[in-house]
Image: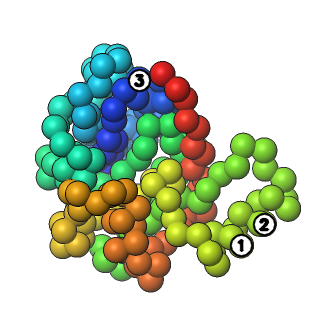
Amino acid sequence: MLSVIIATRDSERPLVPTLAALVPGATAGLISEVIIADAGSRDETAVVADVAGCNFLLIEGPGGRRLKAAAAAARAPWLLFLEPGTLLDAPWIGEARRFIGEPVSAQRAAVFRRGTASPSALREAWALLAGAVWAQPSPEQGLLIAKAFYQTLGGHAEHAADTEREFIRRLGRRRMVTLATKAFFSRQDA
């Protein structure tokens, strides 16, 4: 039903918790494969991917080329793009299923709500307001999109300075849904 795509480069440490957070989605039958699109890591990213049972693709070139190639190789009709270090909150599985099941979703994409490390009611309200009014969704929030819709849009631009943000801008706010489930992002240096 869903192929998860993660672009990596020396991402061994942040990749471990991201993959661990996906295990419930795999056991629930939502995730059919995880594809690691690697740029030639010199750390143990390939070992982590192998131990976790991921499909590991070594793809030379810019991030856009890696993401596009991984999407083309994906077997599932839905794609979930994640960054190493992104952790999805527990209810993401049910919410992703609901989004995928809506007929209108075939021409839309979804991101998860930004999670904060120390939630307070005021901070949470401010994050919601800022996200609704000013901020574009970011790659750290993940991106859930039908593979056919992704291909119709031309996929990630190969040579954009920030290919993931450029793709989100091209999608536009009208074709984006923010799911209630939170995505927490933590950069871990190798």
Q: Amino acid at mark 3?
A: Glu
Q: Are marks 1 and 2 in contact (CB under 8 Å)?
A: yes
Q: Is residue 118 left or right of residue 68?
A: right
Residue 91 spot, x, y in % from top left: 57, 50
Q: Which label belongs to residue 118?
A: none
Label 2 sits on residue? 125
Q: Amino acid at mark 1?
A: Leu
Q: Is residue 131 left or right of residue 161?
A: right
Q: CA distance from mark 3 to mark 2?
A: 34 Å
Residue 89 vs 103, above or below: the answer is above
Label 3 sits on residue? 12
* Disc 2 element: helix
Q: Is residue 146 left or right of residue 126?
A: left
How many labels, in total?
3
Label 1 sits on residue? 129
Within 10 Å of disc 2 (Cα), the crowding (few <14, some 14-19, many 20+) is few
Mark earlier in primary sequence (1, 3) = 3
Which sits in the foreground, 21 or 165? 165
